[in-house]
Amino acid sequence: MRTFLHAGLLLTALIAPAAAEAATLSFQVRGPGGQPLPGAVVTVEVAGGAAAPVRGPYVMEQRDIQFQPHVLIVPVGASVSFPNRDRVRHHVYSFSRPKRLDLPLYGRDETHSVTFDQPGVVALGCNIHDAMSAFVFVTATPFVAQSGADGRVTLAQVPAGSATVRVWHPSIRARGNSMAQAFTVTAADLASTLTVR
């Protein structure tokens, strides 16, 4: 068992031997109180790793006066459509550094598309409905997933080598709402608990 503590990110690793040159990494993300943290985005960036493929379609719709989904994970270079499914108009915007956007007022069954060409988190809002918020998480790594209700994430076929695991969630009290830890992926499966603050 290995335990790493860095800037509030606790990574406890249980490693079992395996013969392959890749591993399946399983994480459980927990909040400061030790409860599972759903909706956290976990990425593993491997040195010299392949870029995330662009598959799509990627959709961030407006429905019931909210964005759906609340967090959309896309690879760098992805085009995201923003259809309006509401009976009211929306004006979608972002001032985020990875992608500033302004989709002027548009109505039901109209759509706009935006290409996200830089990695990072893009916070979305609506100029008409202040309560509307969402995030587009743009990543260069194919090893990314969002935690479920139980806080669990599994990433398969992660190549062995130097890596960084990152956890992002809007509630994390750190710069960029994210925490990171360097570690080495061995040719073995790994199960970990990630505790964020």
Image: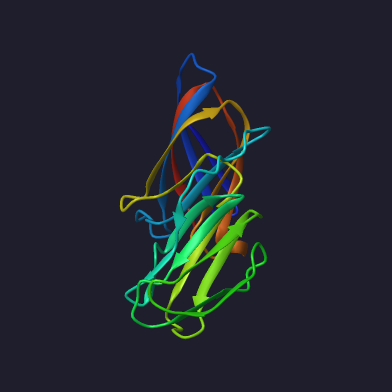
Q: Residue at x 42, y 79 (%)?
A: 107
Q: How many marks?
A: 0
Q: Quadrant of residue 93?
A: bottom right
The residue positioned farthest toward the bottom in the image shown? 128
Does residue 103 lie above or below 77 as drawn?
A: below
Between 24 and 105, the one nearer to me in the picture: 105
Q: How is the image coloured?
A: rainbow
- Residue 171's x, y, as percent? 47, 66
From the top left corner, tell me how far across and down residue 148 is, in percent: 34, 50
| Residue drawn at 51 percent across, 83 percent down | 127
Q: Left or right of 158: which side holds 117?
A: right
Q: Can you name the residue that lies furthest to the front here?
A: 110
Q: Is residue 151 visible?
A: yes
Which residue is painted at 48% across and 61% down in the image? 81
Tell me if 84 is positioned left or right of 142 in this view: left
Residue 178 at x, y percent in the picture: 56, 57
Q: Is residue 170 in sight in this rendering?
A: no
Residue placed most toward the observer, 118 or 49 = 118
**Residue 159, placed above or below residue 88:** above
Instruction: Classify 170 as above or below 29.
Output: below
Query: Toward the viewer: 47 or 64?
Result: 64
Q: Position of residue 20 (x, y in %)?
A: 50, 16
Name which quarter of the figure residue 110 lies in.
bottom left
Q: Is residue 30 above or below residue 162?
A: below
| Residue extending farthest top | 19
Q: Residue at (52%, 51%) from the top-left corner?
A: 74
